[in-house]
Image (cartoon, rainbow, N blue to C red):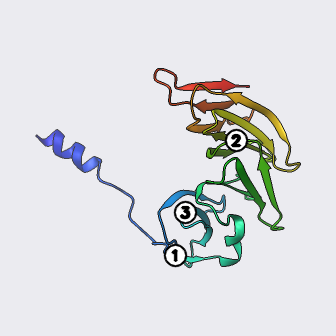
Amino acid sequence: MASTLTKAAGMKSILTPSITLKGHGDWIESISYFPDGQRMISGSGDKTARQWDLKTGKEIEKARAVCKDEVVWEVAVSRNGRWVATAGDRPGELKACEVETGIMKTFKGHSREISCIDISVDRDNTLLASGSDDQTAQIWNLDTGKLVAGPFKSEDWVGAVRFSTDSKKLAVKSPVHGRVMHNYG
């Protein structure tokens, strides 16, 4: 019995809430930290992507214009903090904002809703991967706005995309029974 109690005590959560961020008017669909750990971005069914100052617990309102008029399903921040990417419910539309300049880029290529995104972890954080309900994954260059690889065909809608740590491979998750991932590289 003592080992059970010890095990249960060992599984006790070490995380405690430190701040609650309030402001979205609908479900929050996705969140991502900035690399400085002082900011976060969230995407919501209220058709906004919001950036938060985690020291004050307040929204940085000037950053809200990343997505308009669409549910924001996915958000991602590059590991160098230069880019914020969002994907919404508008078919095939993927957006990226250069944080310092506010320059917005739109990437069009999918024929249906984008279900997942990831930004590469390479030296420059310049690649953006997207997966869609159109059964494809694609890789874009954030600097040029051009498609650099794909579309890669999946057997069903794409549920997740992730770059390898060297950004030379892309894992693509498809929900087909018995098929977990495709690897491109």
Q: Are marks 2 and 1 in contact (CB under 8 Å)?
A: no
Q: In screen coordinates, is 26 left or right of 42? A: left
Distance, label 2 to label 1, CA atoms, is 32 Å
Q: Can you give x and y, in whole percent of width and height, for residue 84 in the image?
A: 71, 58
Residue 44 badge: 3
Q: Earlier in the sequence, mark 1 or mark 3?
A: 1
Hey, what amino acid is under mark 1? Gly
Decide: is 44 above or below 59: above
- Pointer 1: what residue? 23
Question: How many C-alpha atoms fall within 10 Å of the one at disc 2: few (<14), some, or many (≥20)?
Answer: some
Q: Can you give x and y, in whole percent of width and height, for residue 96 in the image?
A: 75, 56
Question: Of residues 17 and 48, which is closer to you in this image?
Answer: 48
Between circles 2 and 1, the one closer to the viewer is 2
Decide: is 22 above or below 172: below
Hey, what amino acid is under mark 2? Ser
- Pointer 2: what residue? 111
Q: Residue at x 76, y 61 (%)?
A: 97
Q: Residue at x 17, y 39 (%)?
A: 3
Q: Residue at x 63, y 46 (%)?
A: 113
Q: Can you give x and y, in whole percent of width and height, for residue 170 in the image?
A: 68, 32
Q: Residue at x 55, y 30 (%)?
A: 174
